[in-house]
Amino acid sequence: MREIVGIMGGTFDPIHFGHLLAAEEARLRFALKRVIFVPNGEPPHKKDYPVTPAEHRYQMAVLATASNPAFETSRIEIVRPGPSYAVETVQQLRQQLDSQAKLYFITGADAVLEILTWRSADRLIQSCEFIAVTRPGYDLRRLQEMLSPDLLAHIHRLEVPGVHISSTELRRRAAAGESLRYLTPLPVVRYIAAHRLYSPGTQQEERKQ
């Protein structure tokens, strides 16, 4: 039987329940056998904040996904040198999985709207299906203006309640010493506290070491 696999790409800085809920909804809706979480090693698009070291983001993803047997976390982008491009990740995973496997790349609707800025965007969209995760009522009509009908056929909309949780807000709350409970799994809350992630000055100190 042909294996159907989801790829959940992202910075995961930090991972939170919005990510997990989106992955689980995608798994159920699209009959995915498993979902592979792939933390970016080196995000290719410039961020407006200093990104937490990849190893921390990977460890948080492992902790967050451990309770779901259908979830796993990959180091594929962390160990690959250079910027983390989705087209290269999909190609590598195809080599590791059954050649006949059907792949769904799960990401937020905002990212999908920027897909033409991604490396080899046409080749990427042709090489897998895309699940554009949105909150209810989110308008994706811009995609119809940007993409040709054959590319649009590879993009599937998935409305998920609760995806308004954001990593930006978690970083802000952590920096302010506010509670992260019920926003991300408790093991992740404890990891952030133990490593003082997002505390003022912490990431700058790690980069000097």
Image (cartoon, rainbow, N blue to C red):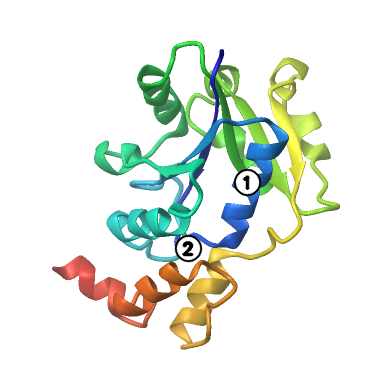
Rendered residue at 46%/88% (across/down) = 177
Q: How many marks?
A: 2
- Image x and y of residue 120, in percent: 49, 24
Residue under numbered circle 1: 24
The quadrant holding residue 79 is: top left
- Image x and y of residue 58, in percent: 35, 53
The quadrant holding residue 208 is: bottom left
Name which residue type carries label 2: Asp
Rendered residue at 48%/44% (across/down) = 69
* Residue 48 disc label: 2
Q: Is residue 115 visible?
A: yes
- Image x and y of residue 119, in percent: 47, 30
Q: Left of 55 or right of it: where is 169?
A: right
* Residue 57 disc label: none
Q: Residue furthest left?
A: 209
Dividing the image into 4 quarters, which one contains the C terminus? bottom left
Seen from the viewer's position, the closer of residues 114 and 54 is 54
Q: Residue furthest right?
A: 137
Rendered residue at 60%/64% (across/down) = 166
- Image x and y of residue 75, in percent: 32, 42
Name which residue type carries label 1: Glu
Is 130 situated above or below 190? above
Rendered residue at 53%/23% (across/down) = 124
